[in-house]
Amino acid sequence: MEPFANRNANAPVCNEQTGAGPHQFRTVEADVHGYISELLSKALDRGSLDQEVSAEDKERLLEFLTRFGDIGGRADAFAYTGSSRRGYAVEPGAADQPGQVLGPPPSLHEVIAGRTGRYLTFELGYDQAMMMFQPVGGMDAISTALHRAIGADVVALGAEVARRAVEQGAKIHGPVYRAELDDAFSVAWNRTPFIEGGTAIWPDRGSGEYALLNEPAGRVYFAGDWLSYFTGWQAGAMDSARYVVQALHRRVCAEG
């Protein structure tokens, strides 16, 4: 196993619909946290939330927000003016190289209208949080090993060049994204026979369908990530497969 970096503070973030970015993830995060902290601090200080928090809790919360958003204190009107959290235009180094912090942040309106802050919540999901791991070389190392074990004469592989994906990537990373790409493939999940989708999103696991599919239909058992609580993950598929194997084992033992 090897670490899988599900979050990269230097990764570019953009919103093509609003024209925002690309900006580094750390820059977007600093601006969103900064302005949220400024707004909440001002509301607290004006007494707008006195019905919800005590005087002591208000001061504790103001202290927290000062650090969370890296904003000024009461004397500075809790203003968010940016800091090294946004990143550097020139990286700091040794001796007389302090670096050059990125310029002042955009306005509050620009940050809200850019709608890049919505990307900050992705890693808050239970199944997306660090620290994450993967097989050495990536998750497809599992399927590659199975292919090697079963034999190329049994399993047929196919690939489609991801031209559009490369074009989209070049919009963020520039021409180097296309120039340094060694290989690529894409999968049209909606065209995959019998699956017809990338992952399942259950609106309600208590409506009956989920429980029904987790039961055998005669001698036929169903398994897959969509029959687990980790849809979209190989871990969910493996949990489901283990569940079915255990059910088969119990059935065989019961039937003698």
Image (cartoon, helix red, strand yellow):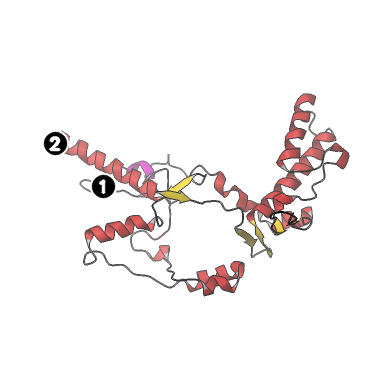
> Which residue is at a point 40% across and 57% down the rendered structure image?
137
Q: Main secondary structure of the magenta part?
A: loop
Q: Position of residue 155 (x, y in %)?
A: 25, 64
Give the side of residue 63 with respect to residue 187, left or right. right
Q: Any magenta on residue 125?
A: no
Which residue corresponds to mark 2? Answer: 255
> Mark 2 or mark 1, which has the lower sequence index?
1
> Which SS class for mark 1?
loop
Mark 1: give few (<14), some (14-19) or many (20+) Cα within 10 Å.
Answer: some
Q: Position of residue 36 (x, y in %)?
A: 74, 44
Quote the CA–CA distance across marks 2 and 1: 17 Å
Magenta region, residue range: 196-215
| Total labels drawn | 2
- Residue furthest toward the front? 95
Which residue corresponds to mark 1? Answer: 221
Which image quarter holds the C terminus?
A: top left
- Residue furthest toward the right? 75
Along the line of sight, the residue nearer the viewer: 79 or 91: 91
Q: Is residue 31 visible?
A: no
Mark 2: give few (<14), some (14-19) or many (20+) Cα within 10 Å.
Answer: few
> In the picture shown, does residue 88 fall above or below 217?
below
